[in-house]
Image (cartoon, grey):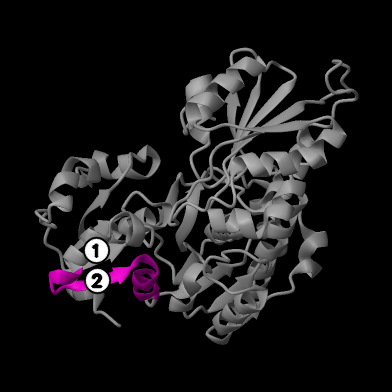
Amino acid sequence: MDINLSKIKKVFFIGIGGIGVSALAKMALARGMEISGINDEDSPKTLDPFRESGIKIIDLKTVLKDVLKDRFKIPKADLYIYSDAWIYRGPAIIEKAKASGKIVMSYSEALGQFAKEYKVIAIAGTHGKTTTTSMVAEILMDAGLDPTVVVGSFVKKFNSNFRKGEGKYLVVEADEYNRHFLNLAPFITVITNIEADHLDYYKDLADIKNAFDQLLSQSENKIIDYKKYLDKVPKLSVPGEHNRMNAAAALSVADFLHIKLTNAQKSLNHFSGTWRRLDKRGESNNGTIIYDDYAHHPTEIKASLQALRELYPHTNDIGVGVYPAGAKKITVLFQPHLYSRTKALFGDFSQSFILADKVLLLPIYFGREDKDESVSSEKLAEAINQTIRLEGGDAEAYPDFESAEKAVLGLKLGPKDVFVTMGAGEAYKVADKVFGLTLDSK
């Protein structure tokens, strides 16, 4: 469905606190549209900017009784945009929107409509989308091309998941889940990598590759093999071979757009990262270094731990206290994301923590799924132990956040420790509670 955005005056966002939906809400706001929305949990990072601007955000908890009794009256709008997560979390709200007779679209469908006014640079791939999108955005900004940007995190350079530019380019993170990215018709498409994931939707790796092939068929220009730029990547402030690969992909876009190599390299040299991508949040009062990372796939976990080991080498003798210079023990608090992903990639997950000294597991974040009794964090902990105990580490699962918080406190972490919350869910809340941090801590 094509819509005339110039006729849209009011937009209501269902799930406005989501990282993608909130970016699109900012995009609508930047166009002069009146926006409002509903959310089911407090998400200060994404919601506070709206509240501070006086935009009305309904908390689902406050209207839940009316929703359940079919008494909820959805605010009037010309366009309703919903997060896919709300197909499971709040289907009654989406049905209310459809009953209004007005236009109703998913986030990805609506993004495709907003994107039609730009030359789209779509960054796709199983891993590295967010960081590569942010790197490309900063290169274009520094080159004076003034891009509009939609990204699945907060870019530290402009402290947002959205940037309004006056230039012709839209740099956008293109999500493969449910073939969402097929709503885009890119000017340039970058594929960082392809790997098995989202197997709750895709049949297998061949099905995933087919989706990427479809995206490429919709693109004017395609960048797949960017490895030839790897030797041109400058020194980065963000660690890890995966980030050097992301930077190589960003350089390929800069070259395609005829941006001077030295200027692009300078931008990458100053790139400071994004929120929740191996994000150093600070230090505790007793010197424990604390990170938060969005890694929720085995390949991402391995890459993040490898990057941390570049910064903090292994201890010589774990448990004895003999350390080489810069050595740290790394403790990971991981929340598996989705039963389907954990089950499909169980063996890979069990092997992915080899560079950690200790792994604590929260219950699986179920998101859009029903509980699957055949897989659990307890079973994953057992499997991890068969691997990492050989290296001196161990893994343990906890039934809830409170138990995990007590366990972290009991570790008595100090100046020789790095503590990493990891996963696409809410593991970071344990660090908030134990160490008194907020997501804005640096």
324 with respect to 234 (left or right): right
Query: Image point 77% across, 52% down: which residue?
Result: 241
* Classed neighbour count for the residue bearing mark 2: other residues with Cα under 10 Å, few (<14), some (14–19), many (≥20): many
Name the element at disc 1.
helix
Label ID, residue 104: 2
Query: Image point 62% across, 66% down: which residue?
Result: 125
Q: Are marks 1 and 2 in contact (CB under 8 Å)?
A: yes
Q: Residue 433, image x and y in percent?
A: 48, 23
> Is residue 300 depicted above or below 45 in this figure?
below
Q: Nearer the viewer, residue 206 or 101?
A: 206
Q: Which residue is mark 1?
A: 94
The residues colored magenta run: 98-115
Q: Main secondary structure of the magenta part?
A: helix
> Is residue 419 depicted above or below 104 in this figure?
above
Q: Is residue 122 visible?
A: yes
Q: Which corner quadrant of the image does residue 59 belong to?
A: top left
The quadrant the C terminus occupies is top right
